[in-house]
Amino acid sequence: MMQKTVKEIINYRRPDKRNSMRAKAIKALAAFLVLMILFTILSRVARQVTIPAVTITNPKKGTIDRRIEASGQVEGNQLLPVTTAAGLRVKTVNVREGERVSAKDVLFEVDMEDLAEKIQTLEEEIEAIDLRIDTAAANSENAENKRELEQQKAAENYNRAAASGNQTVASAYESMIAAQETKAAAAAAYDEAYADYQQKEEALSQALEHQQNVENMISGDPDGDYNIQKEEADAAAEKTQAERDTALQSVETSEQTSQQAAAEYSAAVNEYRQAVEANKDSLLDKEHAIQDADLPADADSTREEAEIEREGKARDLEKLRKIQENNGLVGSEIDAVVTKIGVSAGDATPEGMNMVLADTAAGVTFTAQISEDDRKYITRDDTVSLTDADNNVFDDLPVAAIQANEENSELYDVTVHLGGNKLEIGDSATMKFTKKSSVYNTCVPIAALHQENNQYYVLAVKTTDTVLGEETTAEKVEVTVKEKNAAYAALTDGALTSDQKVITDSDKEIEAGDRIRVEE
Amino acid sequence: MGRKVAFLVLIITALIVCYPILFILAGSFMGEAEIKNYLLPMLTDSDAFVTWQLIPEMPTLRYYVELLLDSPEFFRMFWNSVKLVVLILAGQLAAGVPAAWALAKMKLPFPRALLFLYIILMMMPFQVTMLSNYLVLDTLKLLDTHSAIILPAVFSTFPVFIMHRFFSSVPEALLEAARIDGAGELLIFVHIGIPLGSGGIISAMMLGFLEYWNLIEQPLTFLKTKSLWPLSLYLPNISLENAGIAFVSSVAAFIPALLIFIGGQDYLEQGIVASALKE
């Protein structure tokens, strides 16, 4: 009994109406866990597939070598133009650009008929010019004769005027001298009359004084008899009075005469002066006339111009005749390479150059264009290497010049002189130059460098502790580029440490903060 | 009539209680635009209230697919949680069950004082013991390992307390009879104690599961390495921008707890009752 009870107790099962419910819940939980296992695997696979695989590298110490490569052409050092008379019809062109020609090789041929016509036209033109020259010469001689005549006339007029003027002046002078003498004589007469008058005046005053003395004696001695004395005194006074009056009259008369003579003299002086002035004026006019006549004839360059024109035409004619003598053939005078052709068959020869030849004896020059950026790294006397089309390499060639390109201001022409028989005119070649930089501590491959809004940055590998363990993500590190070339960029120190890894490549596009998988 | 009213009140109350779950379920089927539209007031710091609809306007499984196929971190945390819970519960079975049996049925010195100590320790919130825990774990070099969570939990007092209640109710006469029949103490424990206390054991395990499935403070305090974190720390790591993922992961975290609850509902009730009984 007891055993049975114990067994019941041991095998005791709680009566549970929710048994089936519980079983279902437990099954569901199991299924849920299985599902979770499945999705765990799936999500990890998906993550593995979607995470970009990246290759990384450490920033290294190094140099940023600048490699400059530019292709260019070999040109002649000395370029010579080939010219002929302009306007000749070209019959055939016998060379092509780049062709090598020897001295006396025919470059092109002009049409002989056209040439003959041109020669005839020129000859006629020269004849017409000759006529113009003759006419101009005759005109010039006539003008010269006319001028000489004028000069003669003017001289004659002058002489004549001078003679008549001088005569007038001389007669006026004589009149003036005569008047002067008359005046002097009148003055002397006056002086004489005046002296006489003064004597008479003195005598009168003495007579009057004596008369007074007598009267005083009479009044002092009324009783005295002084009649005789008085009568004598009165008579003497009266007589001297009369003499004096006469002398006075004589003075007045001579004074009038003297004044008249003086007036006549000054009139004569005036007349003389007027005659001199009139003579001067007259002579000045005539002198001007002579000067006018002496003036050179109007400049006339008609003849000279015509002569110059004739010379030009004659030269052209000379050239044409030379070509005619050569049967219309224009040849090279030197061994050269044709670098430019300005004529074509059927067209007229242009003004100026018809062809340009590069003298092979003068040596050759290689010229290539480089960018403004590259210009900073290459200087004169740097040595470059040239590789021609057949891959022949010519090393250690010094740069002769670097000049701004005439057509494109952003380009520079690098010139290298080539000695020997390295390359020929017209050959293409590639110039190569490597500039070593100083050593930089932080150099990264250019593939690691990105740019956004003018700011360079690299994506560095950042290890973060996440729920899934240590995870690597891409971290944006802004950097400053010191120098870079096509392969590497040197960064300023500080932004990156040498043990910090930067992403150089990725199988998917990545941005800062993205998870990444580093492929070793 | 009275029954109907009571039923209605209960239904309404149940709906209110279940609303958070319905809310999360609805959110897990919404698209990004729809969620953002509803949660906009939260994102923009405005004074407006968040609105919600229980039926998505444009249902989508997008976030389920994203969580299940494109979120390995979720699974890492999920399995961390599973590992923690399974090991803790296994440890509690190994340590807690004999302890509870000993406390209930063995002649120990000062049994009441011992039990009182257990209850005191059980009452202490984690914040109180955190520092001492930390120091001990540090000394034992267990910090930042799962053992830092597992070991203290294995020796937790709560399951011992629950199981003690159940083991105490096993009749003393039954044990006496077994002894008379010659059964040793181990035999009695295995063949009588465990079967009769199985309800208590299961309910302790249920309560333990729910507690350890939702651990937050301990892993946050003791685990530095993110790859060791349990699922309960997944949600706090999701920004509001990824609210859709948050809803779905909430649902996924909720499912095992729900299934455990359905499976052991009655044990759970017994356990709760047992823990509520006054001494």
Image (cartoon, rainbow, N blue to C red):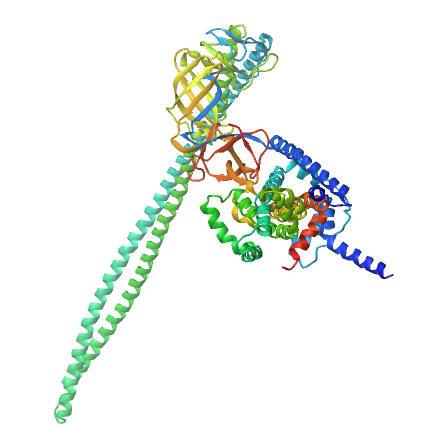
**Image quadrant assignment for residue A376:** top left
Quick check: B194 above or below A56? below
The answer to whether residue A35 is left or right of residue A460 is right
Can residue A449 be seen at all in this image of the molecule? yes
Quick check: A479 above or below B267? above
A177 or B96: which is nearer to us? Answer: B96
How many circles with numbers are drawn on the protein? Answer: 0
Can residue B39 be seen at all in this image of the molecule? no
Quick check: B256 above or below A181? above
**Image quadrant assignment for residue A285:** top left
Which x, y percent locates residue B225? 52, 42
* Residue farthest right in this picture: B1
Which x, y percent locates residue A255? 28, 66
* Residue farthest bottom in this picture: A223
Image point (44%, 21%), residue name: A432
Image point (47%, 7%), residue name: A102
The answer to whether residue A255 is left or right of residue B142 is left
The answer to whether residue A241 is left or right of residue B174 is left
Quick check: B115 above or below A168? below
Which x, y percent locates residue A262? 30, 60
Quadrant of the frame with the N terminus of chain A:
top right
Which x, y percent locates residue A106? 51, 7
A424 or B112: which is nearer to us? Answer: B112
B212 or A366: which is nearer to us? Answer: B212
